[in-house]
């Protein structure tokens, strides 16, 4: 009777692979579990900081403080002056900046389709939801160094203090169209947005996302007011 | 070979990037900023050294038929550890590096060193070889990153190095610039260090 060493049997590589998998996957599971809380807390911190950055100007005006101080102390500012609310018919996270029961601005979590995947952003809107006060893109999968430049401050700064819905905006509210102009060209009006060179699809996607989402938000809020 | 010789062979004379032309993808992708290059380099050094050590440690028991699967699993585990560490402790850098940290798994240098060195040498030697190969790779990344960040953003490690008169070169921010710089770099090394004539 021939005795094949166990290492040369068909079973050995399978068992070896199984043991290695258990050891390394176990090690990763422990590592992930021990860092999970920290990762989630980092995400939450970053998110709250963006919300406060967008709401800093109206809050600073009402509190007679400097915006930078509010941003630096974003955790306390968020807890004291920001409330998450629900607008019926709108499946989005909506935050309000409230000082002495008066709503100073809205901040809404929006999303849209980019070139490679979903873009997620936060926008600040005036209390009547007719003016766009600011934009921050916090999650995107666009091409590094091209489309990903939508996160650059000069690009985002173009979306502040824009009257997106006319003052006599009707209940079917349709926001004003934006127009893309080449990067570096001086805009003739607030609706002209300098696009990212080499990332036309991403630039168009940002505008489309803004228009669609602002329209949705405005209509939902109008319906809620009527009810 | 002494540990010192192993280190210098994998870092300089047999450098993975300029001698073996490995790890080119990430060398092109993350070198627009020096900080990204440094963190990527540290991630690769960590993964290379520990994966080399582990692969070498279990080499006597690893069946030949599944050795590459085992190597990939070990490399992937260490790379995921780097990814989790960055997400938990350096979220900004983790965001900037994006998918490239995960892609260290597919970096040819790691599989190359695992197959060519770690699977045939002692654990400590493999550890030193991993550090050497990682340092050599990081060196190239930092040199390319230095040129790209300086001309593309006018800064070094985020600190402004050029005056207000400087106009940033957009091409340096984009990946094609890394192609030109890397090619010129390899050319200079080949001519000056290896005395290649052509």
Image (cartoon, coloured by chain):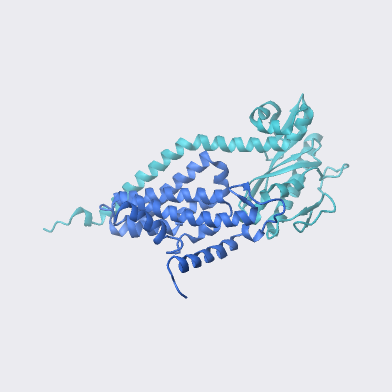
Residue B92: image quadrant is top right
Compared to residue B80, the image places residue A65 above or below, namely: above
Count of numbered circles in the view: 0
Q: Quadrant of the N terminus of chain B?
A: bottom left
The chain letter corresponding to blue is: B
Image-based side of B113 in relation to A91, left or right? left
- Residue B178 position, x and y percent, is 56, 61
* Placement of A61 over or under B2, stated as above or below: above
Please, which residue is most extreme toward the left here? A1
Query: Residue at the spot x=46%, y=48% of the render?
Result: B43
Residue A225, image x, y percentages? 80, 34
Most foreground residue, A30 or A54: A54
Relative to A6, B45 lies left or right: right
Answer yes or no: is residue A116 visible.
Answer: no
- For residue B194, what is the image quadrant? bottom left
| Residue B13 image position (x, y, % from top left) | 39, 61
Where is residue B67? Give x, y as percent: 32, 57
Q: Quadrant of residue A85?
A: top right
- Left or right: A200 as drawn, with respect to B103: right
Residue in the image at 56% along x and 34% along y: A41
Instruction: Please tell me which residue lies in front, B189 or A97.
Output: B189
Residue farthest to the top? A100
Q: Could you say which is closer to the camera, residue A226 or residue A145? A: A145
Q: Residue furthest right?
A: A168
The chain whose colour is cyan is: A
Residue A21, visible in the rendered structure: yes
């Amino acid at each position: 009777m021939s005795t094949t060493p166990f290492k040369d049997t068909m079973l050995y590589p399978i068992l070896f692979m199984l043991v290695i998998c258990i050891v390394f996957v176990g090690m990763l599971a422990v590592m992930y579990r021990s860092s999970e809380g920290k990762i989630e807390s980092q995400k939450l911190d970053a998110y709250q900081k963006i919300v406060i950055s967008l709401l800093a100007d109206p809050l600073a005006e009402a509190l007679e403080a400097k915006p930078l101080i509010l941003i630096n102390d974003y955790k306390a500012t968020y807890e004291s002056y920001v409330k998450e609310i629900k607008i019926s018919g709108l499946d989005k996270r909506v935050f309000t900046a409230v000082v002495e029961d008066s709503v100073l601005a809205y901040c809404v979590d929006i999303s849209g389709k980019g070139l490679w995947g979903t873009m997620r952003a936060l926008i600040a809107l005036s209390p009547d939801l007719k003016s766009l006060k600011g934009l921050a893109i916090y999650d995107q999968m666009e091409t590094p160094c091209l489309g990903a430049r939508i996160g650059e401050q000069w690009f985002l700064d173009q979306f502040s203090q824009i009257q997106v819905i006319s003052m006599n905006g009707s209940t079917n509210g349709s926001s004003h169209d934006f127009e893309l102009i080449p990067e570096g060209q001086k805009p003739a009006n607030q609706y002209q947005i300098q696009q990212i060179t080499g990332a036309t699809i991403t630039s168009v996607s940002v505008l489309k996302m803004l228009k669609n989402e602002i329209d949705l938000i405005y209509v939902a809020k109008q319906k809620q007011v009527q009810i | 070979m002494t540990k010192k010789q192993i280190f210098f062979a994998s870092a300089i004379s047999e450098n993975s990037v300029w001698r073996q032309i490995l790890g080119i993808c990430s060398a092109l992708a993350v070198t627009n900023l020096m900080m990204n290059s440094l963190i990527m380099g540290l991630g690769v050094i960590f993964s290379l050294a520990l994966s080399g050590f582990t692969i070498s440690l279990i080499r006597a028991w690893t069946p030949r038929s599944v050795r590459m699967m085992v190597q990939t699993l070990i490399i992937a585990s260490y790379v995921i550890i780097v990814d989790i560490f960055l997400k938990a402790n350096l979220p900004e850098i983790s965001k900037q590096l994006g998918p490239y940290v995960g892609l260290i798994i597919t970096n040819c240098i790691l599989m190359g060193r695992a197959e060519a060195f770690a699977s045939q040498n002692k654990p400590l030697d493999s550890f030193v070889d991993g550090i050497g190969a990682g340092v050599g790779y990081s060196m190239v990344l930092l040199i390319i990153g230095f040129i790209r960040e300086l001309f593309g953003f006018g800064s070094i490690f985020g600190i402004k190095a050029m005056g207000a008169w400087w106009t940033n070169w957009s091409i340096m921010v984009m990946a094609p610039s890394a192609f030109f710089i890397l090619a010129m770099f390899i050319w200079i090394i080949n001519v000056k260090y290896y005395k290649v004539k052509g």
